[in-house]
Amino acid sequence: MNQAIQFPDRDEWDDQRHAICFPALVNGFQVMCGITAEIIASRYGGDNKDKWLELFRLNRWDLEEEAEALIEKGQEDAQGWIWLS
């Protein structure tokens, strides 16, 4: 794992985005990452935010690795977010 990118355990459900949002610290700067309910459900199942959060946490390491790769490739959207797809 790249020590310049860290993922604190501060994931949360965002009703407005209908997604799980989680921060990454990149060289000391915060970058927000997210994965929508649709993507979580298609990958792991679940049908509500509590189940999706549980599934996110069970698969945290893989999802953080994926986010790390996107961060390293500079795949931020126009708002500076990294979205797993």
Image: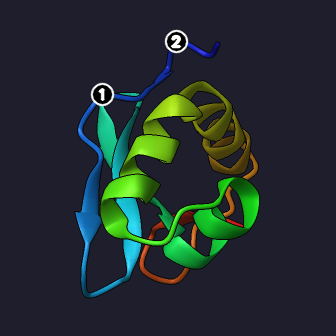
Instruction: Tell me the quarter of the image containing the N terminus.
Output: top right
The residue under label 1 is: 8
If the image is split into quadrants, where does the C terminus sit?
bottom right
Percent across and percent down for residue 39 are: 65, 69
Q: CA distance from mark 1 to mark 2?
A: 13 Å
Q: How far across and down, in percent of the image, does residue 38 sit?
A: 60, 78
Residue 57 occupies quadrant: top left
Amino acid type indicated by mark 1: Pro
Callout in the foreground (1, 2): 1
Tell me if mark 1 has few (under 14), some (14-19) or many (20+) residues whose alpha carbon lies within 10 angstroms of its own.
few
Question: Which residue is identified by label 2?
Answer: 3
* Secondary structure found at label 1: loop
Q: Circle 2: is it few (<14), some (14-19), or many (20+) Cα within 10 Å?
A: few
Q: Is residue 29 above or below residue 14?
A: above
Point 23% across, 39% down: residue: 10
Q: Earlier in the sequence, mark 1 or mark 2?
A: 2
Residue at 30% x, 28% y is 8
- Is residue 85 visible in the rendered image? The answer is yes
Q: Measured along the vertical axis of the image, is residue 50 above or below residue 15?
A: above
Image spot of residue 23 (x, y percent):
34, 45
Q: Secondary structure at mark 2?
A: loop
